[in-house]
Image (tube, coloured by chain):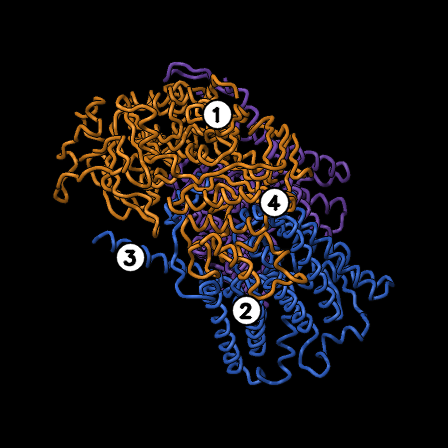
Chain colours: A orange, B blue, C purple
Amino acid sequence: MTDGDTHPDDPTGSYQGAAPQREGGQSVGDVQTVAADGASASGLGSQEPVLVLEHASKSFGALRALQDVSLSLYAGEVQGLVGENGAGKSTLVKILAGAYRFESGHLFLDGEEKVFETTAQSRAAGIAIIFQEPLLFPDLSVAENIFMCRQPLRSGRRVDVRRMRREALALFESLGVTLSPDRLAEGLSIADQQLVEIVKAVAADARVMVMDEPTAALTATEVERLFKIVNMLRDKGTAVLFISHRMDEVFALCQRITVLRDGRLIVTKPMAEMDEASVIQAMVGRDLGTLFPERTASTGDVVLKVEHLTSLGAFTDISFEVRSGEIVALAGLAGAGRSEVVRSIFGIDRRDAGRVEVNGRELPSGVPSAAMEAGIGFVPEDRRQQGVLMNLSIERNIALPSLSQVAAHHLVPRGSEKRFAADWVSRLRLKYGRMNHPVATLSGGNQQKVVLAKWLARHPSLLIVDEPTHGIDIGTKAEVHRLLAELAAQGVAILMISSEMPEVLGMADRIVVLFEGRISGVFSREEVDQEVLMRAASGLANRAAS
Amino acid sequence: MSSDVQTATGGTSQPDMPLDPGGGGLRARLGPLMRWESGLVVLLLATVLMGSQLSSMFLESGNFFYIGINVGEFAIMALPLMLIVVTGEIDLSVTSQLELSGVVMGYLFAHGWPIAAAMVVAVCLGAVTGAFNGFLVTRLGLPSMIVTIGTLTLYEGIAQVILPNTAVGGFPAGLTKIGLVPIPHTEIPYSIGFFIIFAVITAVVLHKTPLGRSIYAIGTNREAAFFSGVHVKRIKMGLFITSGILSAFCGVLWSLRFASARYDMATGLELNVVVIVFFAGTAFSGGKGSVIGVVLAAAIFAGVQNALTLDLVPAQNQNIVIGSLLIASVLIPSVADVYRRTGQRLQDLARRRL
Amino acid sequence: MSVATQAPGAQLPGDDKAQRSNWLVDLFVEYRSIGVLLVLVIVVVLTSIDNYRFVSVTSLQQLVSGAAIIALLGIGETLVMVTGNYDLTVGSVLGLSAYAVGDIFQHNQHFPIPLVFLIALGIGLACGIVNGAVVTMARVPSVVVTLGMLYVIRGIDAVWAGGNEVGAASLPGRFVEIGYGTIADVPYLALIAVVAVGIAALAVRTYRTPREFYATGSNPVAAELAGVPVRKRVFTAFVISGAIAGVAGALWLSYFATVDSTAGSGYEFLTLAAIVVGGVSVFGGSGSIIGAALGVLLVNTMDSALVVVKVSSSWDEAFQGALLLAAIVFNRFVTVRRTRELRTRNMSHVK
C-alpha cells in the first residue's frame, strides 16, 4: 500500500499512485508497505500497523471532503496530521471516531476490518479521540469520569471505589501528573480536562489516540506537560495521531508527518526527511502570489479604535485601530484569544476593561445591537451555529438584522424580504435553488455568502470576519477574497481573523499578532513574511523591530 | 470544534451538506407544517362527523355557542403559550395566573371597588406574575419547566390565601351575561370573539412583523439569532408578560362568565391549554408554530369535549381522552421521524453492501 | 486537594476509609444535607417551644408516617430527575394503585395481603413502563409527556372509582395495621421508608448502572460517547419511579384507611419541591437519595409545624410553591459559586 509517491515540490499536488491489486477479504498483513511512506525509515516497517485507512472518500453533496485518502498508524509512533482549514482533517477524525461513515474505503484495526455505526463502537474498538473541547461529566468526580461504564468491580458486581481511586492515581502517576481523583470534573481547566480525557483513553486500553488540536487552548507550560505525556504514551506502544496547526510542535513531537490538502493525501514522510518549508509547500501547494487580489491601500479615518481591551482569562490590554479602506488581520495560533477579542468588540461577550470606539462613539459592553447600530457587521467563525439559521430561508436570513429597514409601519410587506435580499444575492453570485429554501440546502461557500450578504445589506463601516474562508471550496474562497478587497476599496474597514498564513499575508494591510491573549507584534504588509509571523504567533521575539 | 460536539453522538449530521428540499417553492419551506395543518383539518371534519353521530344535538344551531364557550379562555391562553414554546420555553402557570387574577378581581369587588377598576388591577397583576416568571427564566437562567411548576403552585396558593374557602359572586349582570348569551346577532360567545381578535393580532405579529420573525429566529437557533442582533432575553420576557396579561384577562372572563371567582376554579386545567398548543403542531424549540394550527387545534379540542359531554361522558373520562391526545400529538412527529430515519438507514446499508 | 504521588500500589492515606468515607463525604461535602438537617432541627425546636405537643409521640409518629410515603416517592423521583427528566405522574399512580387495592379489598376482604402488594407493584410498573416508553420515544420533554399521562391515569382512576369511596370497614385489620402499627414507638411506615431509602442510597453508591443515570443527566452527549445506553437508562428510571409509586399507593391506603378517586392528587408537586429542597438539581446529574429524603422530612415537618402553629391550611400551597422556587434559586446560587470556586482552585495548581 503506497502513500505519498509524490515529491513535495510537485506543484500540481497530485496524490499517491495506484495501490497494488488485492482481492477482497485479503488481510492487510499480506500487503507490503512501501518505503515511500517512511514507515521503515522510522523503524516501524517491521511491525504491522495498528490502524489502516484505505482509500477513504467522503463527500457532502458537491463538497468532496476526503478523496481516496489512505493512512497507516503504527504502535509506538506519533504521526502528525497537518493541513489547512478545510483540508479534510476534521472529516478524517470524525470518520475514525465513528461519527461519519465514508462512502468508499476501508478501515482496519489490527488487521481486522471494522465498520463503526456509532461513536461508542469506535471507542470500544480502542480508538480514542481527544477533542479540542473535552466531554466530561461536570457533576461527577474525576475518577468516575475516567471509569464510566468500566468501573472496576469487586465481589457481587459492586463497584470497587477504592480500586477506582487507586487506579486513577496510578494512571496519573504513570503520566507524571498531579490531579485529585476525588474532585468534581466541574471547573477543571481545559488542560486538566484534556488530561482526564487522555487518562480515560489509557484506562480503556486505547490502541489509537487521535489528538485534535490539543494545544489550542494551552499555555506553554501545559503544552510541555502534554508533550511529556504523549511521549510516554508512545513509549507504551500507543499509536498517536497528532493534529495541529503549530509547526514547531509537530516537528518536536512527531516521527512521521502526513499532509492533507483539499481532501487529498499529499505526502506521508518521516520528519527527518521534511522541513518546515517543504511541509508548508505541501500544505499550500500553489504559488502564493497569484491567489490574492491586487490591492492598493488608500486608507481614511479611523473607524474602530480599541483601547486596553481586557477580558479576564481570555485576553489582556489589547489596543489597535482600523481605518476605513484598510484590512487589518488578527493573526495568531488557535487559542491566542482572537475570536474572544472580536466577540468582545461586537458585544457578544462583555468586557472587563477597556474601550471600544466606532466612528468616535463609544460602544457599551455586551450589546450586539448597539454595535450593529454603530455600523459593525460580524461574520462569526462558527457558521452553522452562529452565522446562519440553517432552517430558515435564505431571504429571511439575509433580512434578519435589517428588519426595521425592511418593514414599513412595523409590518413586513409580502415579498419585501425577497426584494431586499435579491440585490445582494446577485451581487455575491450566490448559487441557490430558490430564495425561500432553507440555508441548509446551500454549500458551505454559499452559506458564507449568505452571512456576508446579511451584513453587507446594512452598509457597515466596519466588517469583522472571523475565518472568512474556513471550510470553503477554492473557487468561493477566491470570490470572498475579491469581495473583501472590493469592500476595502469602497472604504469599508475590515478586521479579519485568519489562521491561514497565506490569507493573512495576501489580504492584510496590517497584521496584529496575538500570543496567549496579548499583542506580540504589529506589522505592515511590506515588513513581514511567514517566518516573522510564525515567530510572533509563537511568542518568540523577532529580530526586526515591529 | 464546538459544533462537532453535537455530531459526536453518531448522528449523521454533516456540515455544509446541501439537502434536497424535496419540491419547489412555498411547499419546501412550509412543507412539514402544511402537512400537519391539513391533518388537523381532516381531524376537525372527523370530529364534526363523530360528534354528529354521538348526539343529535351536536349540529344544532345553539350548540356552537356551548362548544365555543367552553374552550374560549383556553384558546386565548394558548396563543402566547404557543409563542413561548416556539422560543423554547414553556409556561405551565397560566391557569394559576387565571385563578389569581380572578380572585383578586373578586376580592376587590367584594370590598367595594368598582368592577372596572377591579378588572384593570386584575389584568395588571397578570403582567406582574408574568414578569416574575420571565425574570426567573431570563435573568436567573432557570429552566422554565420547573420554574413555572413552582409558580403554578405559588400563584394558586396566593389565590387560596386571599380567598380561602369562599367564592365571590354578585358581579354586575350586564357583565356576567357573557356566560349566557352570545355576541348580539351572532352565535359567537364573547370569549371566542376576544379569541378571534387576539388570534388575528397574534397572526399578524407572528407572520408579518419583525418581532414575529425574531421569535421564529430564536426558536430556530437562539445563538445565531443573538449573533444577528435579536434581543433574545427581552423578547422572552415580553412573551412571559403577555402570557400573564392574557391569562389574567381570561381570569376576568372566567369569573364573570361563571358569575363567581374561586381560587381553584381552574385547577388542573393547564393541561387543556398545553394540549391545544402541542396539538397545533408547535415544535418545542424548532421554530415551528402557527396561529392557524392553534385555531384548528382549539376547534378540535372544543368539538371533542362537547361531543363527549353531550354523550354524557363524565369529565374524568374526558381527561383520559385529552391526556391521550396530548401524548399522541407529541408522539406522532417522533414516530414519523424514526420512520424516516430508519428508511434512510436502510438505504445507507443497502448502498454499502453494493 | 491534590494528592502527593507515591509508589503505585502503596496504601494511600485515606484509602481504607475511601469506601466508607464516600458515604460520609457525600453527606458532608454536600453541606447541603447538613444544612437541611440543621433547618429541620431548628424548625422542630421552634415549633415545640410554641407548642410542646408538637414533639409528643403521637404527633411525631404522624409526622414521620406521612413523610415516609412521600419519601418513597422521592426515591423514584430523584432517580428520574438525576437523568434530567421529571415524572409528574407519581401522585396519580399512587392514587390509582391505592384505589385498586381498596377496590380489591372491598370485594374480598380476605384477599391475601402479599398478593395485593404485588398487584400494586404491578400497576406501578405498568404505568412506569408506559411513561418510560413515551418519554424515550418522544422528542418532547418529559414534563409535557408526564403531564399528559398524569391526566390519563387520573382519568382512569376516576372512571374506575366513580364516586365510590372505600372505607376502613372494608379493609382487613392486618392490612391497616401496617399503617398504624409501631415497633418501640416507631411506625412501621417510617421503618419501611428508612430501609427503602437506605437500600436505594446504598445501591446507587455501589453499582454501575445508577452511575450511568447521573452521567446521563450531567452530560447526555458525553454519556452516549462513553457508551452509556441513555435511552435504556431513562426508561429504567421511569419504571422504577412508577413501581415505587405503585407500592406507595398500597401503603398510603393502609395509613389513611380510606380512598376515593382523589387520592394522591398534588403529591407530584410536593415530591418535586421536597427533593429539590434536599439538593437534587433541576438540571439533572446531581443529588443524593439521602439528601432527597431529608428534604422530604423537612418539607413535611414544615407543613405540620405550620398547622401546629395555627397557620391556616390555606397557606399550604403558597408556601409549597415559594419553597420550591426558593430551593431552585438557592441551588443555582450554590452551583454557580461552587463552579467559580472549583475554577479558581484550579489556577493555583498550574505550576
Q: CA distance from mark 2 to mark 4?
A: 35 Å
Query: Where, quadrant-wise, is the N terminus of chain A in this rendering?
Result: top left
**Residue B311, x across and y down, in percent:** 55, 78
A490 lies left or right of C7: right
A418 lies left or right of C206: right
**Residue A242, x across and y down, in percent:** 34, 29
The kind of residue on which mark 1 rests is Glu
Q: Are marks 1 and 4 in contact (CB under 8 Å)?
A: no
Residue to which mark 3 is pinned: B347
The kind of residue on which mark 4 rests is Leu
**Which of labels 1 and 4 is toward the front?**
1
Residue to which mark 4 is pinned: B142
Q: Is residue B319 above or below residue C225?
A: below
Mark 4 belongs to chain: B
Residue to which mark 2 is pinned: B317
Q: Are marks 1 and 4 on the same chain?
A: no
A413 lies left or right of A222: right
Res A527 label: 1
Q: Residues within 10 Å of mark 2 (few under 14, many from 20)?
A: many
Q: Are marks 2 and 1 on the same chain?
A: no
Mark 2 or mark 4, which has the lower sequence index? 4
Mark 1 belongs to chain: A
As helix, strand or loop, the secondary structure at mark 2 comes to: helix
As helix, strand or loop, the secondary structure at mark 4 comes to: loop
The kind of residue on which mark 2 rests is Asn
Mark 3 belongs to chain: B
Q: CA distance from mark 2 to mark 3?
A: 44 Å
Q: Residues within 10 Å of mark 3 (few under 14, many from 20)?
A: few
